[in-house]
Amino acid sequence: MGDGPDPAGRGRPATQPYRSKPGGMVLFLFAALFTGGAISWAIHAYNTPRYTSGGREVDFEIVGGLLLLATGSVGMGRKLLAPSAEFVLAHDSRNPVVYLRPFDEDARRIEYYPVGMRKGGRKLMRTSEPASREGYLKRALGQIGPFIAVGAPGDTLAPLGAARLYLADEEWQREVEALVKGASAIVLVPETTEGTRWEVTKVARWVDLRRVLIIVPNPALRPLGYARIQALTAENLPVALPCDCASADAFMFDAMGLPQAISFGRDKAALQPFIKQVKHLPELRA
Amino acid sequence: MTALWRHVTVSPIALWILIGDLPLATFFSAISDFNPYVFLITGAPAEGAIVWIAVTAFRAQMRRGQMRNLLHDALGENGEVPADVALDGFPDIPLCVSKKWLYCARAKDIDAQRLDQIAWAYGESFMLRPWAQLAIWNRTATANVLPLRKADITPALERIRQAAPWLPVGYNTAMKETWNADHRDFLALIDGYRHTGRIFDAPWAGRGVARVAAHGRSNVFLDNIDRTESREQNRLTKRWKDDGL
């Protein structure tokens, strides 16, 4: 669990994020109102002559602001309505797909420029996108089973993507063990933090590697990150990932136990070989 | 006269105004910050423009002299002499590199940093703008950003490359991603090159220039609405400061 749950089990209690069905519905209603407001403002601005260039900019900012508020309301509404892992597991009879990652991964972003403090010069436009592949993985692996992850302690709203299970520090290793042993597939984002290292070791011991999908830093973009994870897997897995790899976003292990590179790109079917392999494996007891 | 010529060649707008190409002058005045020349387009006489150019050229020359004096002071403070650094082009090429120090000419002062504290240097060229700047990052993830002419980027980077061959000089996406996501490993790699005195030759490293977009008014608007990105940037910057120290 990365720098989240403490492997030594030092006392953080389980906290639950705020969930509310009526709250979510109200926010969806607000989103509809903001969108309607943006559309009517755009129509009004189009039909009103402006004699200064600043007037158009203000119109643009108002429409943009309303649309952003609408998007924000939808996002927050979805988070309020997000089901807990307990609910999902109770209502889905299939074995879950367990997503094990460092908690930092939830917030990590791909920045378009190097990050840091800049002294002098011209300011750059700040642009970034979320780095996590959680949404993509949830959509793709939903064919196998419900997508479950342990939630980061202190989440005020459950993030979108995997259904979260919030655990106290004393119980997380026991719960993760039960989840992993009963999972139809494991998605592992290895890191060198203590919690994630524990997970890598245990997954290697408890799970048939054909059920494991390892998400790695793409060596074409993050060669040093890949080398770090390659060294970690060489230490902890029975089969190491290849040292030389041009480009890969993930690895699965084939019937011979050999790692096979997978590149996500824009290919929605990139995970099909893994899904097919897992579906052909004997069913585990739930 | 040399100062005037230097200034005219530095400023393409001035050059175009001098040869009387008003449409081009209008275009460049619109896209750059060099606004004083706009008065020509509004009907001021050409003699006025020439006087204006001469005055600004004189002021630029005065500033060059001032910066050189400041540099001499900075060199003295670090126990070095002007012979230790290549001064040609300074402060138009706003940096000097000695064996142990890197001196950057800022707007009104000189910033001196130990060379072994520098982690990465590359040029930035703005999209849709005639601007360029040099970014020199140190180990605490703080960049000295120095505006300069596009034509001066290559000589400036070459100067750094010669003084510190172990330093990554240049830009590509893999370097940016490594800096952002695997910062500690990046610093460790640079340390390895520096301690062994090898030329930085990681196969994935690039020698290009970063193509960047300028921060505009709409970005201020978006930054105020969405704080996610600034929170994440602050978190990373804080962590790297700890890593680099």
Image (cartoon, rainbow, N blue to C red):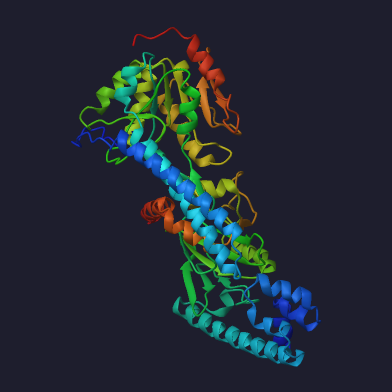
Question: Where residue B31 sits: x, y (%)?
Answer: 66, 70
The answer to whether residue B44 is above or below residue B26 is: below
Residue at 44% from the left image edge and 28% from the top image edge: A233
Question: Where residue B173 sits: x, y (%)?
Answer: 59, 47
Q: Which quarter of the image is occupied by the N terminus of chain A?
A: top left
Q: Which quarter of the image is occupied by the C terminus of chain A?
A: top left
Residue B139 appears anywhere in the view: no
The answer to whether residue A21 is above or below residue B140 is: above
Question: Where residue A157 sits: x, y (%)?
Answer: 32, 39
Residue at 45% from the left image edge and 57% from the top image edge: B223
How many numbered marks are there? 0
- Residue B216 lies in what quarter of the image? bottom right
Residue at 55% from the left image edge and 54% from the top image edge: A42
The answer to whether residue B70 is above or below residue B131 is: below
- Residue B63 lies in what quarter of the image? bottom right
Question: Where residue B20 sits: x, y (%)?
Answer: 80, 82
Which one is in front, B232 or B239? B232
In the displayed structure, does residue B130 sit left or right of residue B79?
A: right
Residue A59 appears anywhere in the view: yes
The answer to whether residue B34 is above or below residue A144 is: below
